[in-house]
Each structure stands twice: as structure tokens, then as C-alpha cells.
Amino acid sequence: MEYLSKERYDEIAAELKHLIGEVYPKIKDDLAEASAQGDRSDNAGYREARRNQAKTISRIRFLQKILEHSRVIDPGHLPKDEVCLLSRVEFTNLSTQTRMAFQVVSPHEMDLEAGKISLKSPIGAALMGKRVGEIAEAQVPSGTLRLRIESITLD
């Protein structure tokens, strides 16, 4: 079971609707057109259409599985005093005294450039359940990071 924000759930549902309603029918038309051109074994257009069909079907199935096994999380039921899914956490790396801020999200929402880390990442997992002032220890490839929680907000 995965938990998603309402925003991400809607994005996935919209992508799925677009793939099923617009992209896949076009691929079927391209495939029929390429197939009508004759010998399939020596038809680059046909092979390309088949690759696109397989890729699109794979993406559709993946998105369907995400939606089937996901639930939208209600931020109103989340604790505000400890790090949980959808928390925005500001913390200090105690070895470098560097302050950072990230939002803890599901793996399907992770986007480091947007400041979103997965709750399954080493840092995200170490932060989960911690409160302001507590120290989280994250095992990363370069060693152990000691992170002091400075603030927690729920968006």
C-alpha cells in the first residue's frame, strides 16, 4: 500500500486517462497503417509502432497498478509534531552545519530538484517519526549522517 498526496494521485490519473484515451488509439492507428504497407519483417515503421505500443501498454499497466494499490492521504489526520508523510522538515547536518529542508513524500512523488525526498530513502527513513530537536542518523553510502530536526510543518 502506497500513500499519495491528492495532487500526485490526480496527476497519475490524468496521465493514465491521456494514455488510454489519446495516445493508445493513435498508436493503434499507426500500427494498422504500418501493417497495411506489406511485409512486416522488413517494415521499420511497423517495428517502431510495435515498440511504441509495448511501451505505452507497459506504462498504462504501471500507472493502473499504482492507482490500484495507492490511497490518498488526508493531511488533516497526520501528526503535526513529528515527521511523517507530507511533512516539510528543516534539519541541520551536524558534521557540516548545513541546513536543508525537504518534504517527505512517497517514492512516486520524489523530486530532489523540487525539494521532495522519498520516505524510503536513507534520509527520509531516518527522519520519519522524529520530533523537533531530535537527532536522526541516516546510513548513506558516504557514512552516517547525523541530522538535527529544526522544524516540522505540514503543507
Image (cartoon, grey):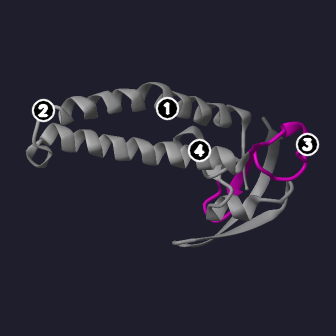
- Residue 127, position in %: x, y? 75, 59
Q: Tell me what residue is drawn at x 67 percent, y 50 percent.
A: 106
Position of residue 133 relative to residue 109, above or below, is below
**Residue range of the region highlighted in magenta in the rendering:** 71-98
- Residue matched to label 3: 77
Instruction: Choose the circle earlier in sequence order: 1 or 4.
Output: 1
Which numbered disc, 1 or 2, marks the residue closer to the eye?
Answer: 2
Q: Which of 25 and 39 is in front in this view?
A: 39
The C terminus, quarter of image: top right
- Residue matched to label 4: 64
Instruction: Choose the circle earlier in sequence order: 3 or 4.
Output: 4
Q: Is residue 150 left or right of residue 98?
A: right
Instruction: Choose the circle earlier in sequence order: 2 or 3.
Output: 2
| Three-letter amino acid code at the position of disc 1 | Ile
Position of residue 34 relative to residue 138, above or below, is above
- Pointer 3 local density, CA inside 10 Å: few below 14, some 14–19, many at least 20: few
Position of residue 20 relative to residue 99, above or below, is above
Q: Is residue 94 magenta?
A: yes
What whole-number distance in Å separates the C-alpha atoms at marks 2 and 3? Answer: 58 Å
Q: Does the magenta stretch include residue 17?
A: no
Q: In which quarter of the image is residue 35?
A: top left
What whole-number distance in Å separates the C-alpha atoms at marks 1 and 2? Answer: 26 Å
